Amino acid sequence: MFRKIFYLLVLLLPLNLFSIQNKFSFITPENGLSQGNITCIYQDSKGFMWFGTFSGLNRYDGYNTKIFNHESNDTLSLSHEHVSTIGEDKDGKLWIGTIGGGISVFYPKTGIFRRIQEVNVGDSNIPLRTISDLVRGPDENIWLLEETTGLFIFNTELELIKVHLPDPDNPTSLPSDPLHGILFDTTGNCWIGSGNGTLCKLKQGADAFEFVTIEDRLAAADDGIRSMYRDKDGRFWIGTTSQGAYMFDPVSEKYVNFRKEDPLLHLAGNTVMAFCDDWDGNMLIGIDGGGINLLNRSNGAMEYITYDLGNSESLNTNAIYALYIDKTETLWVGTYAGGINYQGRYRYKFRNYKPNPADTNSLSYKNVTAIMEDRDGDIWIGTDGGGLNNFGTHRNTFKRYRADPERPDWLQTDVIIHMIQDSDGDILIGSYANGLIIFDKDNEIFKQYLPNDSITNSIGGSHPWYVFQDSYGIHWIGLLAVGLDKFDKANETFTHYRSDINDPTTLNSPNIKIIYEDSNHNLWVGTEGGGLHLYNRDADNFTRYFYQPELEGSLSNDDVREIFEDSKGRLWIGTSNG
């Protein structure tokens, strides 16, 4: 009964959505890692990332990897190649646990290691060989587990100040079972994972251990505790070799078991190697052979992030051995044989849409030339070769409009240059070589305007480069190599404004790049090679602003590409030279 109640509590946690994507970057032996089997990950106080492997210690600075190896003839090197755990003391020294070589303490200023491979307890010398875990405790000391020997506490001067050893004659001592995992709860009590299902609790300041059995069951001989983690809410997560993961409340000493066989609390596998909270409060569970299992703690749903043969950016293996979120909210994933997989929280804020020949609802072409949102919230995308696309945000798919010469009321070109929606709700489209196009989106009818030598008030050119409607409702069409046209939409006629070298009140260039209206209803026209122009509505002509090297304060360049008015009424002119 408690299991169901506890599960309901999980569902009532604050809402968070899945945020980890199956898109990673990689650090492998091919680009500098000492070895592809990652055992642990740690970020030090200076921001360096440290990766322990089966063969050496690696420090990553964001660009390059430095490898620290065991050197048999150098006692100041790493004590063993197989690194198991990494921690840092308050003085910035790194404590490196190894499998077979005890402890190596790294001094960053000198770059040397000091080894701790034996300690003296009373009249006995106790070897330290296999370090299964170490943490910096609330007392600022380093607490570490030797897998078969006990718990050892060192100060920052590398002095052993306390030891807890198994004692068959003392029922409150540590058990003689293998010790894996050490955590502190929110009140400072120490918890140690032992054997195949026992938690050993050492209250703050006490010497006697209390014991909690996670689950009464007949466990397999190899079903040991593999990993332990305290989440942001103070609960413990315990990974096992073959019984999945346990979410354990250290206050009530109750648990919930997530495992492969459970249809509700389902994991992709039962060998659980690592845990971490992601940036949205979801729980990431690393499975040996099952990838990353992401538990949405708002609704109990589980998502599975796994290797995908068809996705070169997916996890490169399903054998997950370590998980870590650093200070910049980057997720680091340690794998078996796949090295490091990583992704930043903010790296993929943009969703990428690409053409897919097998999907008619995908983007029609890769070269996007124009984007516009209409009054209904639909997004229109013009392409250089794929026609027009309508992206419905409610459906997250694209509807394609491609050229069809057999249909006179349809689109006649696949090259879109510019688009606006006018006050009538129609979409005006500037195209390359196919004139002005007006699209009635409600009835899905296209109407085309092309130059006609027999009609003096037809559009002046086939290449409308910029389309604009001003506050007076007038449509302006900027043309390539021709000039500017004023479009009377009701009468379907065009008035032409051309460049005349002998008339300084005309346009200074026939290539129109941008049209803009400021807050005083002044109309500005930017050209390629002719500078900036102010349209004088009463006189129906232009004032030119262009580059004059002898005139201080003139326009810096005659290729005008952008115009913007700021909140103080100042115009900012973007040119090809500043």
Image (cartoon, grey):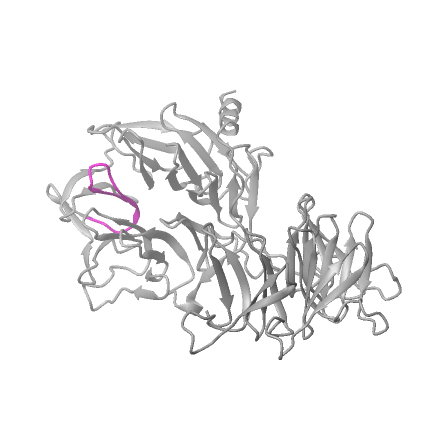
In percent of width and height, residue 262 lies at: 57, 34
Closest to the observer: 495 or 389? 495
For the point 39% across and 68% down, which residue is it? 32
Q: Which residues are magenta?
A: 127-146
Q: Where, by quadrant of the figure, is residue 480 drawn?
A: bottom right
Q: Position of residue 165 (x, y in %)?
A: 22, 37
Residue at 22% in and 63% down: 77
Q: In front: 213, or 398? A: 398
Give percent across and percent down for residue 316.
52, 58
Residue 260 relative to residue 445: left or right: left
Q: How many marks?
A: 0
Residue 316 is at least partly visible in this image: no
- The front one of 146 and 51 is 51
Asked if residue 255 is among those painted magenta in the image, a careful observer would answer: no
- Where is residue 403 drawn, in percent x and y? 80, 64
> Was residue 140 drawn as part of the magenta stretch in this picture?
yes
Residue 511's place in the image compared with 143, above or below, is below
Majority secondary structure of the magenta segment?
Answer: strand
State left or right for residue 309 relative to residue 155: right
